[in-house]
């Protein structure tokens, strides 16, 4: 059981380039999330998904796109990379396990992205 | 709108001293509060959730709805507690709002 995996671990992009950050979970969780972590700024939600085929914007969606064709995968697409997108990106998943439980989130190891 | 405030970005204590990391929230519904921890070069992981009322690694946190707070406490800090701590507010919709985090340093 690998949990949540992310690739790549590190990436340097030039301004205007595009890339896809991959995220996969093997816990059969319906809920998946993408966050960015800027120094001293905490975690900001970019996009989230409540199940395959359903996605919605979070707090900071501009410049990003997502898709959710399967339960396991939730890739994040950056089009026309900008220096402001330099950050650490975390993918997470969660699932409510019964009425008395809560949506604790399981995080991937993160992708450190630099745009220059 | 929901909001989580962690007033201290940095907190430094000596080993063996008590530590309290503050967290205040605003939310009109019934909140689910969590503390997550991120040790150096590791992924975020759940430390505590208020619904479980548990103690993990000597840490406890009590939800105070009157003061809208969920402070994290430990009576005797250890060096291995040095990490970044995030307070998070979850909703029935499955989304969570995170605070900006507090970096705890425990000095020998």
Image (tube, coloured by chain):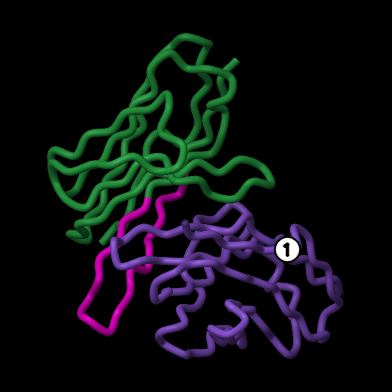
Chain colours: A green, B purple
Residue sitting at x 48%, y 72% = B34
| Residue A30 vs residue A45, the one in the foreground | A45
Q: Is residue A87 above or below residue B42?
A: above
Q: Which residue is mark 1?
A: B7
In the rendering, at what x and y percent does residue A94 appear? 30, 62
Q: Position of residue B95 (x, y in %)?
A: 36, 58
- The percent coordinates of residue B5 (x first, y second) are 63, 62
Question: Residue at coordinates 30% horizontally, 57% vertically from top-left?
Answer: A2
Which is more toward the observer, B97 or B53? B97
Up the image or down, A62 lies above or below A35; here it is above
Q: Main secondary structure of the magenta part?
A: loop
Q: Is residue A107 magenta?
A: yes
Count of all numbered marks drawn on residues in the image: 1
- The residue at the point 57 percent across, 28 percent down is A86
A24 lies left or right of B32:
left
Q: Residue at x 23, y 41 (%)?
A: A55
**Camera-side residue: B90 or B84?**
B90
Please tell me whether residue B73 is drawn above or below residue A54 in the rendered image.
Answer: below
Chain for disc number 1: B
Q: Eyeballing the image, is B21 above or below A17?
A: below
Left or right placement of residue A97 versus residue A90 in this view: left
Q: Is residue A43 magenta?
A: no
Range shown magenta = A92-110
């Amino acid at each position: 059981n690998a949990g949540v995996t992310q690739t790549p671990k590190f990436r340097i992009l030039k301004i205007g380039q595009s890339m896809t950050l991959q995220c996969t979970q093997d816990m059969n969780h319906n809920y998946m999330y993408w966050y960015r972590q800027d120094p001293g700024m905490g975690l900001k939600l970019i996009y989230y998904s409540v199940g395959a085929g359903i996605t919605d914007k979070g707090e900071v969606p501009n410049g990003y796109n997502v898709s959710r064709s399967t339960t396991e995968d939730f890739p994040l697409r950056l089009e026309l990379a900008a220096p402001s997108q330099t950050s650490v990106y975390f993918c997470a998943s969660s699932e409510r396990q019964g009425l008395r439980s809560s949506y604790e989130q399981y995080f991937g190891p993160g992708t450190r992205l630099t745009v220059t | 709108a929901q909001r989580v405030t962690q007033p201290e970005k940095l907190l430094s204590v000596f080993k063996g001293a008590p530590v309290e990391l503050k967290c205040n929230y605003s939310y009109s519904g019934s909140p689910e509060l969590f503390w997550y921890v991120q040790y150096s070069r590791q992924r975020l992981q759940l430390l505590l959730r208020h619904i479980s009322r548990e103690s993990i690694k000597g840490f406890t946190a009590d939800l105070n709805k009157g003061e809208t707070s969920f402070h994290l406490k430990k009576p005797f800090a250890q060096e291995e507690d040095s990490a970044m701590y995030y307070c998070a507010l979850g909703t029935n919709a499955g989304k969570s709002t995170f605070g900006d985090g507090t970096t705890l340093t425990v000095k020998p």
